[in-house]
Image (cartoon, grey):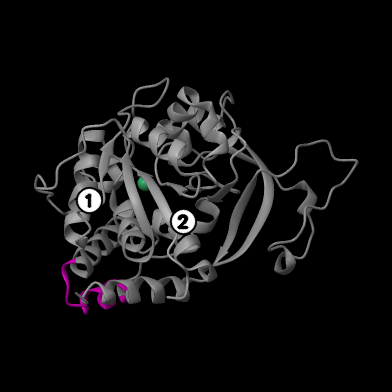
Amino acid sequence: MTTPRRKVIIDCDTGVDDALALVLCLKNLEVVGITTVGGNVGLASTQRNTRYVTEVTGYTHVPVFAGYDRPMLEPLRDASYVHGAGGLGPIEVPEPKKPLESRHGVDYMIETYMAHDDITLITLGPLTNVAHALLREPRLAGRIPEILCMGGSATFGNATPAAEFNIYTDPEAAKIVFESGIPIRMVGLNLTREQRVTPALMAAAEAIDNDVARMVARLCGHVLARSGGTGSFCDACAVMWLVEPAVITKSLKLHVTVETRGEFTRGMTVCDTRPYAGAAPGVDIDRQWQSEPSLPGKAPNVEVAMDLDQEKFNEVLLDTLRRYSET
Ligand SMILES: [Ca+2]
C-alpha cells in the first residue's frame, strides 16, 4: 500500500458493512478513535459490535465511544431487517472484554478536534453525533479538515425512492453537516451499487486463514443470502476513497443539500448536476466547476463519488485480509 497513513476518527453504526469498513481502516489508516451512533441497529448493539471488531482485528487500543442513540427529532427506525437483530448478521456477538470509554462520543469529538485540526472525519451512519457536536461547538466547522461521508445518493434511494438510509434516518442532522462549510466527500448509493458481494469474493475470503477473514466471509455469506447477489458493502466503498483512492475512478464537485420537508423526498440529497449536464463523463474527475451565469445556484460544497473499480476494490480488500495474518 503506497497511501500514507492518514489520521481519522470514524463515526459509525456498526452493522455488516461498517464492520468491513473498520477492518479496512484499522489496518490501512491511523484510526485515532471511533464514536458510535444508533442507526442500523440500536446504540447498545452498535457500540458493542464496534468493540467486538476491534477485538477480532487486534486493535483494542483504539478507543470506542458511545454517542447518541436516536435521531435529533424522530425515534430511531433501525435497519435490523437488513443487518440482523444484533447488527452483524449471523454473528452472535459476545460482550467484548474491551470496555466502552466513559466519555460521551460527542464530548470526545469536540475535545479532540479543538486540540487537533488534521484528522479526517469518516461518517458511516446517521449524522446525529456530528450535528450535535457542530451545534455545541460551532468552531468545529473550522477544525475538521474534511468529512468522508457514506450517505445519500446522486440518483435513487433505498429507505425511500428518494432517500438513502443514513441521511433519511436523521435528515436534520445531515442538513446541519452538509451546510456546515466543512469540505465533504460523499459516497452514496449511486456509487456503492456498483460494488457487488459475490460468491467468488466470499470464497477468496474463506481461503485466507485468519479470524478477520473468517468474519468477513461470514458477513459476505449474510449479504449473499439476503440479497441474492445484488448486495453491497456500502461503508467499505466509502472508506476505500482514503485507503486506496484509485478504487474511486470518477467524482464530481457539486452543490449538495438535504431535503427535510418534501412530501416524497424527505432525506434526499439534492445534487445540483446542472453544470455537468451533457458533459463527457470521462473528463469530469477533478474538473473545475464550470460556472454558468445563467444558472442560479450555489458553489459546490461536496465531491460526489460517481464510479468505482470493483476489481481494485476486491484486490485491496483481499490484500488487507491477508495482511491480518502477519503478526
Ligand atoms: Ca453504517
- Which residue is at 33% across, 54% downward? 17
- Which residue is at 9% across, 44% downward? 95
Instruction: State the CA–CA distance, disc 2 to disc 1.
Output: 19 Å
Q: Is residue 253 left or right of residue 249?
A: right
Q: Is residue 58 above or below residue 48?
A: below
Q: Is residue 92 above or below residue 4?
A: above
Q: Give yes or no for contact between labels 2 and 1 (Cβ–Cβ under 8 Å).
A: no
Quickly name the residue at label 1: 88
Mark 1 Cβ inside 8 Å of ligand 1 = no
| Region of the chain picked out in magenta, as a range | 200-211
Residue 205 painted magenta: yes
Q: Is residue 128 left or right of residue 46?
A: right
Residue 203: quadrant of the picture: bottom left
Q: Is residue 56 visible?
A: yes
Residue placed most toward the observer, 20 or 32: 32
**What amino acid is at disc 2?**
Ala
Q: What x and y, as percent, mark residue 191?
A: 53, 57
Q: What x and y, as percent, mark residue 86?
A: 19, 43
**What amino acid is at disc 1?**
Leu
The N terminus lies in quadrant: bottom left
- Counting residues from the start of the chain, the first of labels 2 and 1 encountered is 1
Badge 2: residue crowd in 10 Å (few <14, some 14–19, many ≥20): many
Circle 2 SS class: helix
Residue 176 painted magenta: no
Which secondary structure dominates the residues rendered in magenta? helix
Q: What x and y, as percent, mark residue 64?
A: 26, 43
Quickly name the residue at label 2: 238
